[in-house]
Image: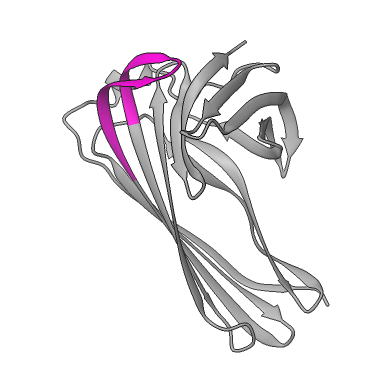
Amino acid sequence: MKAVMIISIVVVLFIGCSSETNLSRLSEEYFPFPDTGSFWVYTDSANNTVTVSVTQVNYFYEGRYCSVWDFNGTNFYAWKDNGSVKTHRKMIKDFGGYSYIVENRWADLFKLPFIDGDRWSEIFTNSLNIAGSIYDVKITTGVTLAKLDNYTVPAGTYNSCYRVQITENIEESSSLTGNHISTYTRSYVLAPSKGIIFFSDSTGEYSLTDIELN
């Protein structure tokens, strides 16, 4: 049985407030797109290692030329325009031996330029016919930014960093599969010209230990 997409709506709300001007941050490259062979290595408190490496650039994927990064064995697709860094999101719901594509789109990961105190939110909704029952999903993403004077990780101390906090709430409703609410929180610290030097998610906290950008 094939999933039938009934409606897909994306609403983006952006609110910004800061004493900084946009021009003061335009010269800083907080999310660089280096060439193939570049890599970042992160380690947690238990010495577990996560490696991110650039495997392809100018790769055509889902209607866009993008960079492909290997994130510890999983492909991560990203591209950048003047207003944001975008990544490709795909969410699949399995039921009764069939797979249903719930989300398949390019979405903002970071809005540019970074400004202290900025916050923005995005709401994505979709409805599918799953085995004759309507399945509704609502994904609400909230993002806040805060400037850090400096931030120290094993790879060094970096100035003028930003912490980006992302909270994602997923609401699913269906008479067949039931109603579910899940919340996920991720945090990133980014440094000029280096990109992400720290991140935390449900698996732990990871700090940059090695980096090579080509």
Q: Position of residue 157 (x, y in %)?
A: 35, 14
- Image quadrant holding the C terminus, namely top right
Q: How is the image coloured?
A: one colour
Q: Nearest the camera: 152 or 17?
A: 152
Q: Position of residue 56 (x, y in %)?
A: 73, 25
Determine whether 17 is above or below 130 in the image. Answer: above
Q: Nearest the camera: 88 or 26?
A: 88
For residue 167, side relative to residue 73 (left or right): left
Residue reaching furthest top? 214
Residue reaching furthest left? 19
> Residue at horizontal 54%, vertical 16%?
210
Q: Position of residue 194 (x, y in %)?
A: 47, 18
Number of marks: 0
- Image quadrant holding the N terminus, namely bottom right
Q: Is residue 50 visible?
A: yes
Q: Main secondary structure of the magenta part?
A: strand
- Quarter holding residue 6: bottom right
For residue 162, side relative to residue 177 (left or right): left
Q: Is residue 145 magenta?
A: yes
- Quarter holding residue 213: top right
Q: Is residue 12 visible?
A: no
For residue 109, side relative to residue 57 (left or right): left
Q: Is residue 24 magenta?
A: no
> Residue at horizontal 57%, vertical 24%?
41
Q: Position of residue 199 (x, y in %)?
A: 45, 36
* Magenta residue span: 144-162
Residue reaching furthest front? 46
> Residue at horizontal 72%, vertical 88%?
132
